[in-house]
Image (cartoon, rainbow, N blue to C red):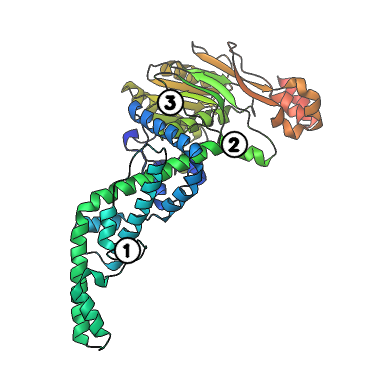
Amino acid sequence: MLVKKTQMLTFKETISTIPALRFVYENLNPCSSLGRKELLQSCFITDVNELQTRFDELEKMMIWYKTEKKHLEKVKQLISSAQDIFGTLNRLKNNDTLDDVELFEIKKNALIMNELQEILRATSFSIFQLLEVNEVIDILDPEKTRLPHFYIYSAYSKELTSMRNMVNKTADEDLLWQISKLENKIRQNLTSKLFPFVSHLEHNFIHIAKLDLLLAKIELAIKWNCCKPKISDTTTSYIGLVHPIVAQRLETENSKFQPIDITLNQESCLITGANMTGKSIFLRSVAFCQWMFQFGFHIPAQNASIAPVEKIYFISGDSDTENTGLSSYVNEIFQIHKILQEMKTGVKMLVLADEFARTTNPHEGRALVTAFLEMMNHKNVICLVTTHFSNVEGTFQRLRVRGIRWDKMEQIKTNPRELNQYIDYQLEDDQEKTAPKEAVQIAELLDVDNSFISLVKKYL
């Protein structure tokens, strides 16, 4: 899959095409619409310094989260009460006279900002500071009640006080009209007084949204047992890598995801292994973590060191062939062509190919995979390819999924449909060029018709 230019790519754009990030979106729980909006507008980060800043902030947030738990619920309550009133602030910027509802929105949110600022100042919070908005509150709270409601107070004008006292004695329409004109004049005056504080309010809303998203990211990291990734120049490595989507599904089946270790560098890597041994899931796990990393999330692994890239490609023969109307092979070839053109421009890429050329004949398939791996041996590319083909030539990293634990044969025979529980998903170096041949053994374990198995063996 070819993604758009990463400099412009937002989280909102990715969740429609990257199912794993949709899963992140659904499992992340910001307290407010401000935090959700901050997430959707966040960008795919390619700059190392910016990534480092994001992860340093997350680290500080984690420390604060764990040491200031007594304040946590109040902070989250205040954030959840904050409203997205950027529309009102835009009207204020234009010096459009605000109505009572808009003035109430500003007062209410200024009170929230003030209370949140006091809590953060009283704790070890050091990521940013909210700006003072006491003057905003004073403008909208002439009676000094500090209550979250607003109307045109009589305290704004002695003339208004006098008129309102008179109207209580007589229902004079002209007097009511005069009161209405004076109230509107007061609204204009309040708008003018609030105008200098637009930037303060915007600053605070932006940082409340940031705080909300940071808290949500920390809680997701704790939920998924994530780690803070290190930023690498060239090598990507994982210890105890887990795919949360698969792990969650396995939990419902009373099973567990087996964490995986791997190191990838600027040398193409080929992974072989029998069917059912998790090669596709592994590729998707690597892609998932790269996306999370470059959107500033902690990583579902015990330890991770990741090289930032500008583009992420995932090639799979079953991707979107129905919508394109192309055969899986033609679709793959178009993607390969795009990747090669991008590579020639020097773009840093993570390229993941799942069973590339699986639908063509083995002779040509091996040649296609070999050529692709050779082309991907490039200083700006981290490339990982899975295959069933034997005798794939070339000099590159070769790994193999350990696969079915044949030493557990007796247990497997008693419950063959639980075969997944007896698969070792760890990767090991493998310099053999012959792909594993376990298909017939797996079919036998699953009690497939004996006549069929005998016929298969006859033709091997």
The vertical placement of 402 against 122, above or below, is above
Q: Which residue is mark 2?
A: 246
Secondary element at image label 3:
strand
Secondary element at image label 2:
helix
Q: Position of residue 268 (x, y in %)?
A: 47, 17
Which quadrant of the structure image shows residue 168? bottom left
**Residue ID at (18%, 80%):** 178
> From the viewer's perspective, is the residue at label 1 or at label 2 nearer?
1
Q: Amino acid at mark 2?
A: Val
Say whether disc 1 or disc 3 marks the residue closer to the N-terminus: 1
Q: CA distance from mark 1 to mark 2?
A: 47 Å
**Residue ID at (19%, 73%):** 158
Residue 104's label in the rendered image is 1
Q: How many marks?
A: 3
Q: Amino acid at mark 3?
A: Leu
Residue 350's label in the rendered image is 3
Which quadrant of the structure image shows residue 247? top right
